[in-house]
Image (tube, rainbow, N blue to C red):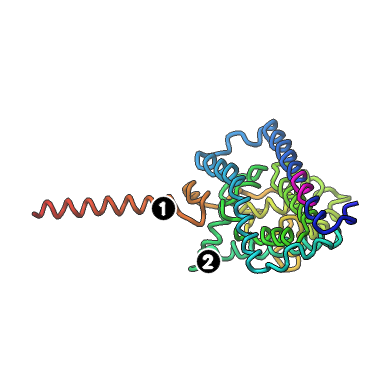
């Protein structure tokens, strides 16, 4: 069995298992995406902006996330050189529970602060990095992968998972990654099976009680909405609702939000995908500056 291997063997086997588990995540994503297509959930909902942002986030994200993970690993190696593989002998189940609880806790606070820092003088960059995930005016399985290319570098969950891998907890970390990703796919999918359960006269009360522990599609869809039954100032959890419940940000909706996304105009696709950088704004500023400079030179020439 796995727990009878020595430490180095545990790490190697864990890394293999993690790779296999991630393949299952992509398989489930594909199945749900096809199901959404078949029932027409993607028909006519994407703007030109969406096509650019989604394509960049998904394709470039697959390339840049491993680089982000390598960057985090380098930081951990520099800070904790003596701790590499230190917990490789830890039991699987307690390690998995600890990773999930710590990962959710870190995610909760980074996620919450990213919303609370919106418009803050020196911290608005954190909101802009997370805003990419909210500018889509829909919720479906693709939105789960619509994140700024640099979000992995600041996401609390990313650091907890990277630290777990660095400490030698490859297998429990792999299972945790799989759980979080699968749960994210379920809660972002455009199938609101939970509404009927929540409204059921016999099991609805028990289901609403369960939503104080686990995030349902309705609870997360509410976070992506505004107006009736919506509000991105609550429901920050990925899989566990316990921290929302504990810190007073849990809201259990009665139905779908009035609208999805963020009110008002969406940012330029380049500013959205590459947040917190503002390539479109910078380019526009350079163009305007160059134009103003040319106009000023022309005025001087006319005066001469």
Where residue 87 sits in the image (x, y, percent)? 79, 64
Q: Is residue 165 visible?
A: yes
Q: Is residue 244 visible?
A: no
Question: In front: 17, or 78?
Answer: 78
For disc 2, the neighbor class at 10 Å (few under 14, some 14 to 19, many from 20) is: some
| Residue on which the image places disc 1 | 281
The image quadrant that residue 237 belongs to is bottom right
**Rendered residue at 61%/48% (across/down):** 260
The magenta stretch spans residue 17: yes
Which dot marks residue 123?
2
**Rendered residue at 12%/52% (across/down):** 301
Where residue 268 sits in the image (x, y, percent)? 47, 48
The image quadrant that residue 110 belongs to is bottom right
The quarter of the image holding the C terminus is bottom left
Where residue 130 sits in the image (x, y, percent)? 58, 56
Q: Secondary structure at mark 1?
A: helix
């Amino acid at each position: 069995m796995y727990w009878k291997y020595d430490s180095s063997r545990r790490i190697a086997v864990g890394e293999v298992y993690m790779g296999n588990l991630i393949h299952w995540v992509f398989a489930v994503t594909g199945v749900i995406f096809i199901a959404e297509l078949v029932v027409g959930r993607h028909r006519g909902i994407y703007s030109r902006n969406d096509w650019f942002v989604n394509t960049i986030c998904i394709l470039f994200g697959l390339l840049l996330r491993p680089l982000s993970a390598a960057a985090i690993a380098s930081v951990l190696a520099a800070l904790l050189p003596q701790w590499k593989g230190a917990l490789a002998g830890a039991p699987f189940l307690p390690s998995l529970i600890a990773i999930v609880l710590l990962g959710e806790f870190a995610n909760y606070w980074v996620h919450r602060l990213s919303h609370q820092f919106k418009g803050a003088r020196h911290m608005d960059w954190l909101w802009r990095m997370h805003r990419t995930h909210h500018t889509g005016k829909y919720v479906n399985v693709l939105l789960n992968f619509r994140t700024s290319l640099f979000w992995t570098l600041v996401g609390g969950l990313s650091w907890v998972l990277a630290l777990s891998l660095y400490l030698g907890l490859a297998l429990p970390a792999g299972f945790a990654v799989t759980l979080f990703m699968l749960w994210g796919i379920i809660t972002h999918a455009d199938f609101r099976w939970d509404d009927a359960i929540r409204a059921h006269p016999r099991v609805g009360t028990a289901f609403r009680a369960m939503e104080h522990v686990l995030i349902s599609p309705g609870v997360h869809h509410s976070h992506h909405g505004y107006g009736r039954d919506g509000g991105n100032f609550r429901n920050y959890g990925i899989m566990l609702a316990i921290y929302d419940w504990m810190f007073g940000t849990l809201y259990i909706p009665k139905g779908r939000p009035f609208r999805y996304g963020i009110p008002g105009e969406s940012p330029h696709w380049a500013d959205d995908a590459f947040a917190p950088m503002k390539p479109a704004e910078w380019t526009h500023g350079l163009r305007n500056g160059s134009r103003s400079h040319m106009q000023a030179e022309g005025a001087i020439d006319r005066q001469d």
